[in-house]
Image (cartoon, rainbow, N blue to C red):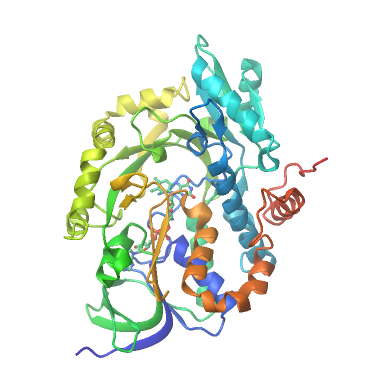
Amino acid sequence: MSSIRTKTDVILIGAGIMSATLGSLLKELAPEWEITVFEKLENAGEESSNEWNNAGTGHAALCELNYTSEKADGSIDITKAIKINEQFQLSRQFWAYLVNSKVIRNPQDFIRPIPHMSLVQGEENVRFLKKRFEALSKHPQFQEMEFTDDHEKLTEWVPLMMEGRKLNEPIAATKMNSGTDVNFGALTRMLFDHLKSKNVDIRYKHQVEDIKRTEDGLWELKVWNIESGAIERHAAKFVFIGGGGGSLPLLQKTGIPESKHIGGFPVSGLFMVCNNPKVAEQHHAKVYGKAKVGAPPMSVPHLDTRYIDNKKTLLFGPFAGFSPKFLKNGSNLDLLASVKPNNVLTMLAAGVKELALTKYLIQQVMLSDEKRMEELREFIPTAKAEDWEIVVAGQRVQVIKDTESGGKGTLQFGTEVVSAADGSIAALLGASPGASTAVHVMLEVLEKCFPQHMIEWESKIKEMIPSYGVSLSGNQKLFEEIHNSTAQTLGLVEKELVYS
Ligand SMILES: Cc1cc2nc3c(=O)[nH]c(=O)nc-3n(C[C@H](O)[C@H](O)[C@H](O)COP(=O)(O)OP(=O)(O)OC[C@H]3O[C@@H](n4cnc5c(N)ncnc54)[C@H](O)[C@@H]3O)c2cc1C
């Protein structure tokens, strides 16, 4: 029988943006609760949340074409775009609250305004973009969207992308000036500094190896102290598995019925980074294109202005790839070890269904540097190989599960909170829209796991996130107020939104 070394109210596994957000929310809602964090790496925000491991897009559906699909009758379905935009508004409000309460001193350290654009070529794509613009711009959340198929205007918006372009094909773009570049790594580190100042016990170089239920209803973690080599036991009333790609194997260890019949498929990513400041200076936007046929939605190519370490740079990608690791710092055995008797059929079904994806990933892995440059030149025709180098991004583990609509072994591209029926443990799986919607997803964890506290917490949640529980798409005035006040607080002011 093992001896429990510590007993606490809450354990957060992983020091990424998700645990940082949940810990920060809980410290506001239940300041007296004791929280312990276990992170296997040396610092916070080193895996997917790190600024070099993701694209830093504040996903608000301002430019991502995969959030608006064309229906059979030719109309554009904007439901998902509205939903994601609303979710991002929740993040903006919580971040603004953290700035107002001096947890974050300088918002510029993690968020900057940057126009979000979609750019397409070819008659069919231009027609789609125009229809999409007409559908979205009627909606208050997208009212400031601009559209152009005029070359002069495009040259004004994205000179670097228009230089040397052979304009023998129609080309068009939309632009939203209220887009953002978010340094999720910096934000994660700031939130962990704050949690430390609030006496949260953060243990780096501690890897969670196993999770079991004890007879008295607690969750007991077997933790490997990487520095000392010791095996420790820690128990808590509530555990959040925020291990990013490492969440699925830990969820499987809990043995809860909700963890069964779920698999994970890792997709790795590469970015090209511009090392020539003169080139980086000529572009000021996040420009999203259209995904290639067979490509998964997270592989939509985009050219991004980024602010990292107070330096402006450009990132292009991501190029997808295959690696059996679930984390960038993971093991080659991760995928194999995640196949269990209860999910083997689900995984096999996905393997058969997703042949197009497999083919796409193989093609991506085989891409030569010259082929990558060719893809970059579709965005920047004059790009020179010597100005660009490759950086390895984070791993994304897509959820595979059996669904009513998709059948056995359906690959999911969203995020998914999986929790025990009694709310004592929850895990976050999947990676899209990702860090941008961390506040929405962690509010979902609170609602699922602490229903008994929600009435008592509601007024504090509304103080932090005024639109909590209210649909912004159905409340134009509130949207306008919140959009403008968060823009002020977060230093994102370009032009105030005023509705007639
Ligand atoms: C290529 C790429 C581009 C992306 N672009 C965007 C974007 O533009 N915008 C956006 O909003 N999102 C984006 N995302 C998604 C976003 O990065 C993730 O959704 C988000 O960072 C996940 O945060 P997390 O806290 O869940 O995981 P992570 O940041 O991965 O943190 C998990 C932590 O858990 C630790 N851990 C794992 N297992 C254990 C264990 N057993 N014991 C102890 N610690 C453990 C890990 O070391 C890690 O530190 C992108 C992701 C990728 C890969």
Please report the residue visible at 33 percent of the width from the left and 57 percent of the height from the top. Answer: 245
308, 143: nearer the viewer: 143
Q: Is residue 266 visible?
A: yes
71, 145: nearer the viewer: 71
Residue 304, compared with residue 10, is above or below; it is above
Horizontal side of residue 412 vs 365, given as left or right? right
- Quarter of the C terminus within the rendering: top right
| x and y percentages locating residue 373 in the rendered image | 37, 26
| x and y percentages locating residue 9 in the rendered image | 44, 83
Please report the residue visible at 17 percent of the width from the left and 54 percent of the height from the top. Answer: 336
Q: Quadrant of ligand 1?
A: bottom left
- Quarter of the N terminus within the rendering: bottom left
Q: Quadrant of residue 41?
A: bottom left
| x and y percentages locating residue 218 in the rendered image | 35, 84
Residue 461, compared with residue 230, is above or below; it is above
Residue 253, compared with residue 338, is above or below; it is below
Q: Quadrant of residue 301?
A: top left
Q: Is residue 164 visible?
A: no
Residue 441, compared with residue 266, is above or below; it is below
Horizontal side of residue 250 vs 487, given as left or right? left
Please report the residue visible at 74 percent of the width from the left and 48 percent of the height from the top. Answer: 476
| x and y percentages locating residue 68 in the rendered image | 52, 36
Total marks in image: 0
418, 227: nearer the viewer: 418
Please report the residue visible at 42 percent of the width from the left and 74 percent of the height from the top. Answer: 423
